[in-house]
Structure formats: C-alpha cells, structure tokens
Image (cartoon, rainbow, N blue to C red):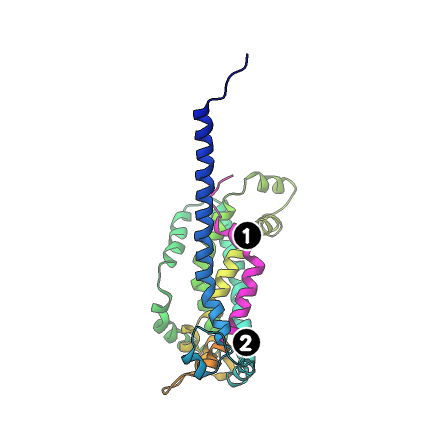
Amino acid sequence: MHTQPNPISSSARGGSIVIRKAGSGVTRLLLTIYALLTLYPLFWLFVSAFKDNQEFFSRPFGLPSTWHFDNFSRAWKVAGMDIALMNSVIVTFISLILTVLIGSLAAFILSRFQFRLKGAIMGIFLIGMLIPVHSTLVPLFIMMKEMALLDTYPALILPYIAFELPIAIFIISAYMSTFPKELEEAATVDGSGYWSIFFRIMLPLSLPAISTVAVLGFLRFWNDFAFPLVLINKPSLKTLPLSLSIFADGYGTDYSLTLAALAISVIPTIIIYLIFQEQIMKGMLAGSVKG
C-alpha cells in the first residue's frame, strides 16, 4: 500500500530549509562585515606607514601617491629599535616562560587535588584578576626602588608574572579539570610520580590552554608601555613601545616614522597569533564542555 506524500509537511520542510539557508547567509554576511571592520585599522596602519607627513594629513584614507619605503629604515635607526626589540624579546619571553611554568604547576595542584584551603587560594587568584594593573604603578615604583631593581629586567619581569598568573591559572586549571582521573591512576600504577605525571601527561595535554595563556601574555608584555615608562629610565633597557615615544615631543609628532615603527612592532604579534590561532580557540573553550 502506497501512501501519498503530505504536501503540507513537504512545503514546511522546504520552508524551514530556506529559512536556515537565509539565516546562514545573513550570519556569514555579518561576520564578513565584522572581519572587514576589524582588519581595516591594520590595513590603514600599514598603508599610512608609507606616506610622508604632508600626505598623511591631506589624504589620510587614500593610498600613497609615492611609497616611502625609507620610512622603515629611518624609524629603525632613529628609535634605536634594534636594542629596543632585543629588550622586548628578553623581557617578554622570560616572563612568558616563568608565567606558563608557575601557572601550570599551580593549576595542576588546584585542579587535580583536594585540600582544605583550595577554595580560598583559588578565590585569591580570581580576585587578582580584578585588580587594575596600572593602579599599582606607584607602590611598585617605591618597592622596586627599595629593592634596587629600577632600571633592570626584573623590574618588568616580576610584575608581569604577578599580574598574568591569575588569568593563566584560571584558564589552565579549567582545562585540566576536564581530564579523567583514570589518566593519573594509570600513570601511578606504572610507577610515575607527581612530577612525571605533570611533565609527561598534564603539560602536553594542556597545550591548547597553555597556548592561549602564552598568546595573551605575549600581547600584554610586548605592547605594555606604562610599566617601562615608570620603571625603566636607561636608554639601553627601553622596550619597543617605549622607544616609539621618541617620535613625539612637546611641539609635534612625526607620524610617518611613528606609523612605520608601529608597523614593525606589530608584525611579531600577527605572526604569533597566526601560528597559534587554532590552539587559542581550543584554549578559550577550556572547561566549557566536560568529558
């Protein structure tokens, strides 16, 4: 016995498919517009870096009539960006390594063990995320002066680690808490100790969360201006953001060199993000799905 297809249900299914396709198309259009709006400032920065000061003001949104490639070499030389770049690399990567290592160890303890003050300790780290970083500049300056750490790398590295640890512990511990207990039990049966479990199992499995922490920390350390401005006075120790201030004085700003220097300084952040973008997305979802 053959049943006739219901024309009403068929049309309803067809209508729902059309609605889904229309909704998907609108979503893609909105995401495309958002992506263009987000990328345009970066495009404008790189285009404007090839202009001279006169053309920057006369045609701020147009392409350069003459491409001044020498802006980059002049900016590099005037700002002493070779020394500043090396200082930024040293401070950023030492801070990142110590932040990831200490944060991962703390997250391992807080996510995999039960003890009396666990909630209080986690609460203290979460409160640390709420403290405005720049409100501590004056106390930090006094502290560093008393410790004779002004105009040294530790004057930047220590505060960077302290202020980045709360978010690092929060992200990594949320990710580690999704791992089944059987992993540790099997490793313990095989004779592994806590250090072996951490370095051989937990750390490799937590790579997405660690990558997220590393990229967020890199962006904060690499682009920070306030801490070097207050804690560093020696020209030989100035970081990249601080070196860019040389193009501005009380009388004006050389925008052509400033934008060229900014374009140079932003390239490492773009490269780092492109390399770790997949890991970042996984890490940002850490703890959202259990299992």
Q: Residue at x 47, y 70 (%)?
A: 44
Q: In which quarter of the image is the N terminus?
A: top right
At label 1, the amino acid type is Pro
At label 2, the amino acid type is Leu
Residue 275's disc is none
Asked if residue 272 is positioned above or below residue 173 in the image, the reply reads below
| Number of residues whose C-alpha sits closer than 10 Å to that of mark 1, classed few (under 14), some (14–19) or many (20 or more) | many
Q: Nearer the viewer, residue 232 or 110?
A: 232
Q: Which residue is drawn at 60% across and 52% down?
A: 199
Q: Which of 183 and 146 is in front in this view?
A: 183
| Disc with the residue nearer the chain's start (2 vs 1) | 2
Give SS at disc 2: helix
Q: Which residue is drawn at 41% across and 83% down?
A: 253
Q: Which residue is labeled 2 in the image?
A: 85
Residue 264 on the magenta span:
yes
Q: Nearer the viewer, residue 208 or 168?
A: 208
Q: Which of 27 and 213 is in front in this view?
A: 27
Residue lying furthest right = 190
Tag 2–tag 1 contact (CB < 8 Å)? no
Q: Which residue is drawn at 53% across and 74% down?
A: 264
Residue bounds of the magenta highlight: 262-291
Q: Position of residue 172 (x, y in %)?
A: 50, 52
Give SS at disc 1: helix
Residue lying furthest top = 1
Q: How many labels does the image show?
A: 2
Q: Which residue is labeled 1 in the image?
A: 208
Quadrant in which residue 184 is drawn: top right
Q: Position of residue 223 (x, y in %)?
A: 46, 70
Give the side of residue 71 with respect to residue 140, left or right.
right
Gap between marks 2 and 1 measured at Cα: 27 Å
In terms of secondary structure, what is the magenta stretch mainly? Answer: helix
